Amino acid sequence: MRLFHFSDENNIEVFMPRPVKVATPRAQEQEWLNGPLVWAIDDWHAPMYLFPRDCPRIFVWPTATTTPEYLTAYKNMTTCRMVAHIELGWLDRLSHTTIYRYELSPDGFESLDDAGIWISRAPSMPLNVERIDNIEKALEAAGVELRVLPSLKTLAPLWETSLHVSGIRLRNALD
């Protein structure tokens, strides 16, 4: 298994556990997830972080529990393994952003069993770092279709389907 952390910084020598910048309401006994941690994402889910940090985005893909009706609809809409949606206002920034993909050793990380997210309470040194200058090309290479919309609000009905839907940084969305 490979784990990654994405950043706009190119000189991180050690990832130190730190609290999240904006605390998220957590279930009882999971408040510790807002505390000092090193966050990583597995290889399959890594395209979710091929974006400027604050860019609001919604990802959709089928899972083993997706109903035949929604699986057919998804396959009629795309041949990609996942679809990423962003707002038009973020397209220029996406096109001009350089991000860095740090690979981390999986030692000391534990899965949250949530869309490929892993956490560690201990510092982690990167194994290597890759500069990504063309995010759109990197998404395409990862089998992700990028869709640009005036507003992400129109995607609200997706949460009522049997497809997997992940929203990231939605607090920064227009609506």
Image (tube, helix red, strand yellow):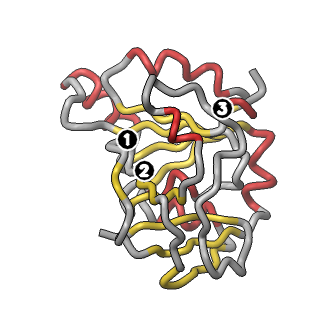
Q: Which residue is mark 1?
A: 114
Which residue is depicted at the point 36% across and 19% down? 161
Q: Residues within 10 Å of mark 1 (few under 14, many from 20)?
A: few
Where 81 falls versus 1 (above or below)? Answer: above
Which residue is depicted at the point 67% across and 77% down? 12
Q: Position of residue 101 (x, y in %)?
A: 57, 71
Q: Which residue is mark 3?
A: 170
Q: Quadrant of residue 133?
A: bottom right
Quadrant (top left/top right/bottom left/bottom right) for the N terminus: bottom left
Where 78 falls versus 49 (above or below)? Answer: above
Q: Position of residue 160 (x, y in %)?
A: 40, 15
Q: Looking at the image, which is closer to me, 75 or 173?
A: 173
Where 119 falls versus 132 (above or below)? Answer: above
At label 3, which amino acid type do we have?
Leu
State if disc 1 and disc 2 touch (CB < 8 Å). yes
Q: Position of residue 5 (x, y in %)?
A: 54, 65
Q: Residue furthest bottom?
A: 128
Tell me which label, 3 or 1, sits earlier in the chain.
1
Using the numbered discs, state the Cα–Cα distance from disc 2 to disc 3 in whole angstroms.
Answer: 18 Å
Q: Position of residue 39 (x, y in %)?
A: 52, 56
At label 1, which amino acid type do we have?
Asp
State if disc 1 and disc 3 touch (CB < 8 Å). no
Using the numbered discs, state the Cα–Cα distance from disc 3 to disc 1 in whole angstroms.
Answer: 17 Å
Q: Secondary structure at mark 3?
A: helix
